[in-house]
Image: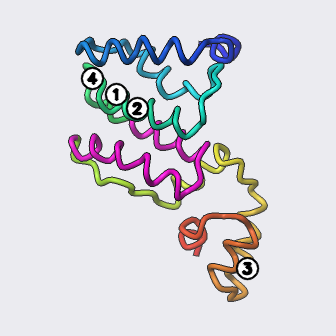
């Protein structure tokens, strides 16, 4: 799918179709399941948190034939949540995703340093913030102060330490 198609696609119509399929126990095609994750990039007038709650709920309840693919989609949805929502807003929505993750035997909400770094671009975090945080930590500056000064989540700062 190209960027132009995603931006001009109507999220409301797409979500309506996905709700119908899920309510009627119809398996989603791979591209439909992927589109659930990229729905925030579609044309819409939804509140972003509401849209992410809806797409997360649909993704968790969707019938997707390949369990590994379903698990990967849930992981991608977590990353999308990090792209659009702040930590406190994200926690509420992630509860839905954790239920499905537990079905697959995954430990919910495990976020290590590597994932934080990989998500940096999604969060719009500049590499300079990481470097500044590392330098502050080397100088013995308190983690919470480093977090406030750089704008990085406290968890990320702790992982940098």
Q: Pick the quarter of the image with the C terminus.
A: bottom right
Question: Pointers 1 and 2 in contact (CB under 8 A)?
Answer: yes
Q: Residue 25: percent from the left, percent from the top?
A: 23, 15
Question: Pointers 2 and 3 in contact (CB under 8 A)?
Answer: no
Q: Identify the residue position indicated by label 4 in the image.
A: 66
Where is 140 relative to 14, above or below?
below
The residue that appears at 34% across and 12% down in the rendered structure is 20
| Helix, strand or loop status at disc 1 | helix
- The residues bearing labels 1 and 4 have C-alpha atoms spaced at a distance of 5 Å
Q: Residue 153: percent from the left, percent from the top?
A: 61, 64
Task: Please report the bounds of the magenta region as a residue range.
Answer: 74-103
- The residues bearing labels 4 and 2 have C-alpha atoms spaced at a distance of 11 Å
In this view, the residue in front, 141 or 49, is 49
Question: For the residue carrying disc 4, how many other residues have a C-alpha within 10 Å: few (<14), some (14-19), or many (20+)?
Answer: few
The residue that appears at 23% across and 41% down in the rendered structure is 104
Q: Is residue 93 magenta?
A: yes
- The residues bearing labels 4 and 3 have C-alpha atoms spaced at a distance of 45 Å
In this view, the residue in front, 78 or 119, is 78
| Helix, strand or loop status at disc 4 | loop
For residue 76, side relative to residue 39 (left or right): left
- Residue 69 has which mark? 1
Question: For the residue carrying disc 2, how many other residues have a C-alpha within 10 Å: few (<14), some (14-19), or many (20+)?
Answer: many
Q: Identify the residue position indicated by label 2 in the image.
A: 73
For residue 50, side relative to residue 8 (left or right): left
- Residue 136 has which mark? 3
**Which of pointers 4 and 3 lies earlier in the amino acid sequence?**
4
The residue that appears at 64% across and 43% down in the rendered structure is 122
């Amino acid at each position: 799918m190209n960027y132009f198609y995603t931006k001009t696609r109507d999220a409301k119509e797409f979500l309506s179709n996905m709700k119908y399929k899920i309510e009627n126990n119809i398996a989603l095609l791979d591209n439909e399941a992927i589109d659930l994750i990229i729905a925030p990039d579609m044309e819409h007038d939804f509140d972003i948190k509401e849209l992410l709650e809806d797409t997360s709920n649909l993704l968790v309840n969707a019938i997707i034939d390949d369990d590994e693919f379903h698990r990967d989609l849930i992981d991608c949805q977590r990353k999308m949540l990090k792209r659009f929502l702040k930590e406190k807003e994200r926690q509420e929505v992630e509860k839905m995703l954790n239920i499905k993750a537990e079905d697959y035997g995954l430990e919910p909400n495990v976020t290590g340093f590597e994932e934080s770094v990989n998500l940096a671009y999604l969060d719009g975090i500049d590499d300079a913030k990481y470097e500044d945080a590392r330098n502050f930590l080397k100088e013995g500056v308190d983690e919470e102060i480093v977090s406030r000064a750089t704008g990085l989540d406290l968890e990320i700062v702790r992982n940098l330490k």
